[in-house]
Amino acid sequence: MGELKTGTVIRTDAKVCHVDLGERVVQAAPRGILFDTGEGVRSDQKNPIAVGDRVEVDLASNPASLDRVLPRRNCFSSNRTDRILAACVWGEIPATLIVNKVDLSDEEELGAIRATYEKARVPVLFTCALDGRGIEELRAGLTGRVSILYGASGAGKSSLLNAIEPGLKLKVGKISKYWDTGKHTTSYSQLHKLEAGGAVIDTPGIRVFRLYGVPVGNLRDLFTDFAPFQARCKFPDCTHDHEPDCSVFEAVERGEIAASRFASYLELLDEARKAPAADEEEPTGQAQEE
């Protein structure tokens, strides 16, 4: 066995996984042992490897082998974030990505998040309710308009609103040590008027967010970081999934499009293909609360 490299699965095909190692993307064949229940995989699971998984790859074998799936965690759920941002593009809703609790992250991690979403032309704001970072910028962004804070439980939405306007005195929960997730403190959506003008809607934490009513052919246009490349694809209606000479996939391999964003797109594409025809009255996005 050679030296193991750690990477992120960005695509799964019938017999291989495309793994982003940072400097390049490789195709790796999963080892048979991963499908045994002894590795912690449920016996009823058809495929123990999912897009977005962190894995270890042995490059010494030919082809490269995917030897281990690392424990999953949801420190920053880029997939859920990308779904909400896609819904905003479809609904023509201006959006800003707020990365809260930055006191718990290092500069390299924050820099990677900013670089990823700046390519998608999404403004990124780093905040911390404890030390006040980004609070004034957030207050300015909310003033004079009706906004909504959307995200997972434990993300600190209520804490941010309390920091912006202490008089709100919204209930704040602590992180559950057992589940490593936020307690469900906001149980319903509520609009709060701001003294500086405007209002903000605080929402319950969400666990799942799905797109509805978006045609398969339009999904690619909801990922704005694809736009500079997809015009150069061999086929004008390229889905960036299986077609040859796909400029978007080539951009992912070169690191010009974040692998996490491409993985989110492929997951949405797969869901859209499997979903029944959407009723015209169905909402663009639907969230399942935590």
Image (cartoon, rainbow, N blue to C red):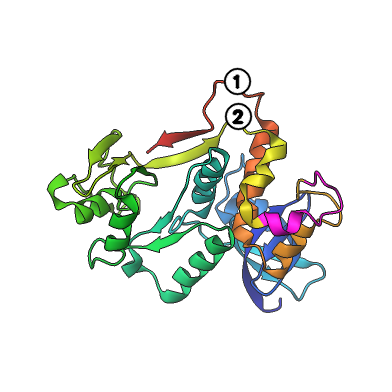
For label 2, the residue is 213
Q: Residue at x 78, y 54 (%)?
A: 231
Q: Residue at x 27, y 39 (%)?
A: 186
Q: CA distance from mark 1 to mark 2?
A: 7 Å
Q: Quadrant of the N terminus?
A: bottom right
Image side of residue 76 versus residue 194, left or right: right
Element under label 1? loop
Instruction: Point out residue 272 in the picture as x, y percentages from the top left corner.
Output: 66, 35
For label 1, the residue is 279
Q: Residue at x 66, y 23 (%)?
A: 277
Instruction: Point out residue 64 in the picture as x, y percentages from the top left corner.
Output: 76, 68
Image side of residue 70 versus residue 20, left or right: left
Q: Residues within 10 Å of mark 2 (few under 14, many from 20)?
A: some
Q: Are marks 1 and 2 in contact (CB under 8 Å)?
A: yes
Amino acid type at circle 1 is Asp
> Is residue 46 visible to the viewer in this orientation of the structure?
no
> Does residue 232 show up magenta in the picture?
yes
Asked whether 274 or 250 is in front, the reply is: 250
Which region is colored magenta?
Answer: 226-238
Q: Is residue 231 above or below residue 168?
A: below
Asked whether 247 or 13 is in front, the reply is: 247
Dominant secondary structure, magenta:
loop
Element under label 2? loop
Instruction: Point out residue 201 in the picture as x, y percentages from the top left corner.
Output: 31, 39
> Does residue 86 show up magenta in the picture?
no
Q: Is residue 153 above or below residue 251?
A: above
Q: Residues within 10 Å of mark 1 (few under 14, many from 20)?
A: few
Image side of residue 286 versus residue 182, left or right: right
Quarter of the image holding residue 126? bottom left
